[in-house]
Amino acid sequence: MIDLRSDTVTQPTLEMRDAMVSAEVGDDVYGEDPTVNKLEKTAAEIIGKEETLFMPSGTMGNQVALLAHTERGDEVILDAESHIIYYEVGAPAMLAGIQLRPVSGLLGRNATDILRQAYRPTDIHFPNSRLLCLENTFNRGGGTVMTSAEMKDVYELAHEYGLSVHLDGARIFNASTAARCDVKEFTQYCDSVMFSLSKGLGAPVGSMLAGSKKFIEKARKYRKALGGGMRQAGILAAAGLEALNMVDRLAEDHANAMRLAEGLAQINGLDVELHRVQTNIVLVDVSSTDMNASELVNEMKKRGVSAVTFGPQLVRFVTHKDVDGQDIEQAIKVAKLIVENI
Ligand code: TLP
C-alpha cells in the first residue's frame, strides 16, 4: 500500500529502533530519566526556548499549552480551520473550560487585519481575551507556510493587546525547510510552541512543548494531571533524539509533494492550487469530476493508494520518508485511471 494518508504513518528508522533498545532510562516523573532530559535539553536548544517538555502527542501538547496559558472562561483567538478547533475533539471546552473564537483567514496573508477585527478589549460583557494560536505549517490550508515576517507582525500586535501567542508547530520543521532558514526564525515569534517528532521526522511517538522555564513548570503539572507522566519514557525519547536528525531530509518530501501535485493537476477534473503546495501536503478538489472525495479515496485504496478525505469534495495526500518517487508516479497513474475512465 502506498500510504499517503498522513506523515503520522511513518515507520521508525533502524537507528531509532537501535537507540530505543539501548536507551538509558529512569523515572521521568521524578525527573530522573537521562534520555528524556537529554531530549528536552537538545530540543530547547534547537527550537530556541528556555525549556521543553516531552509529550505523548501533539494534541496533548496543544491542550496542555491552552491550560497553562489560560483561566476558565478566557477567550482564545484562532483560525476556524486550525487543528486545535477542528481535530482535537472539543478538548479546549472539555479540559480548560475556555471559549474558542474561530476567525477565518488568520493563517493567511492578512493575519494582523484579521486579529485587529477579532480582538475585543476589556468590557463587562466580553470574556477576557488571553491567547492567540497560530499554526505553521497550516494543515487544513494545505501545508502552507506563514512567513516569519507575517508571524512577527501578528505576534507584535498580539502582545500590544496583551495576548500570549501559542504556535501549533506540529510541522514547523517543514516550514523552516521550505523557507530555507533556521527554525528559530519562526519560533522567536511565539511564547510557546508544540512540535511533533512523530510526523515527518519519523519517531513512533511524541511531541515537544516549548516555552519559558515558568511556562514549562506549569505545563509539567498539567501534563501529569492529564495522565501524561510517562515514567521510563527514555525508550521513546531515544527515538525522539534520532528524529531530530531527520530534519534535513524533509526537502525530499516537499519535492515529492510538488511532483504529485503537478501530476494530479494534469488529470481532467482534478483541481490543485499549486501555489498552496509549499511543503508535504497536497489538497485536491474533485468537484469537477463525477465523484465525491470519499468515492475517489475508496477507489484509490482498492488500487493500492491511500489518502484521506478533507471535506465532501476535498482529498488530502501527504508525502513522507516512506514513499519515494516511484510511489508518487504510481499514485498519479492510479488517480488518472480512476478519474479519466469515468
Ligand atoms: N494531525 C493529523 C490528524 O489529526 C489530522 C494529521 O494526519 O495531519 N497539530 C497539527 C497541525 C496536526 O496536523 C496534528 C496531527 C496535531 C496537531 C496533533 O498531533 P498528534 O496526532 O500527535 O496528537
Image (cartoon, rainbow, N blue to C red):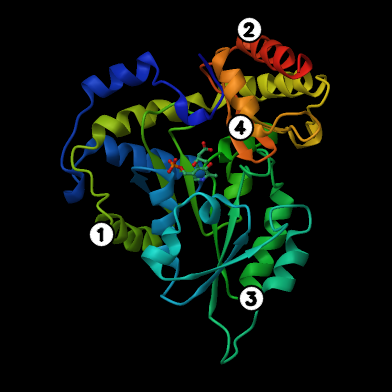
Residue lying at the far top in this picture: please name it: 326
x, y (%) of residue 177? 64, 32
Q: Are marks 2 and 3 in contact (CB under 8 Å)?
A: no
Nearest the camera: 69 or 106?
106
Callout 2 crowding tier (Cα within 10 Å): few <14, some 14–19, many ≥20: few
Q: Is residue 280 left or right of residue 51?
A: right
Q: Earlier in the sequence, mark 2 or mark 1?
A: 1
Residue 184, image quadrant: top right
Which residue is located at x 34 percent, y 42 percent? 56
Q: Where does label 4 land, which residue?
A: 294
Whether ligand 1 has any atom under 8 Å from the Cβ at mark 4 is answered as no
Callout 1 crowding tier (Cα within 10 Å): few <14, some 14–19, many ≥20: few
Q: Where does label 2 land, which residue?
A: 326
Which residue is located at x 28 percent, y 60 percent? 221
Q: Amino acid at mark 3?
A: Tyr
Foreground: disc 1 or disc 4: 4
Q: What's the mark number on residue 161?
A: 3
Q: Amino acid at mark 2?
A: Gln
Q: Are marks 4 and 2 in contact (CB under 8 Å)?
A: no
Cα gap from disc 4 to disc 3, whole angstroms = 43 Å
x, y (%) of residue 23? 23, 26
> Is the residue 129 above or below the residue 259 in the image?
below
Q: Kindly state the secondary structure of the residue where label 2 is placed.
A: helix
Q: Is residue 213 left or right of residue 310?
A: left
Q: Earlier in the sequence, mark 4 or mark 2?
A: 4
Foreground: disc 4 or disc 3: 4
Q: Quadrant of the C terminus?
A: top right
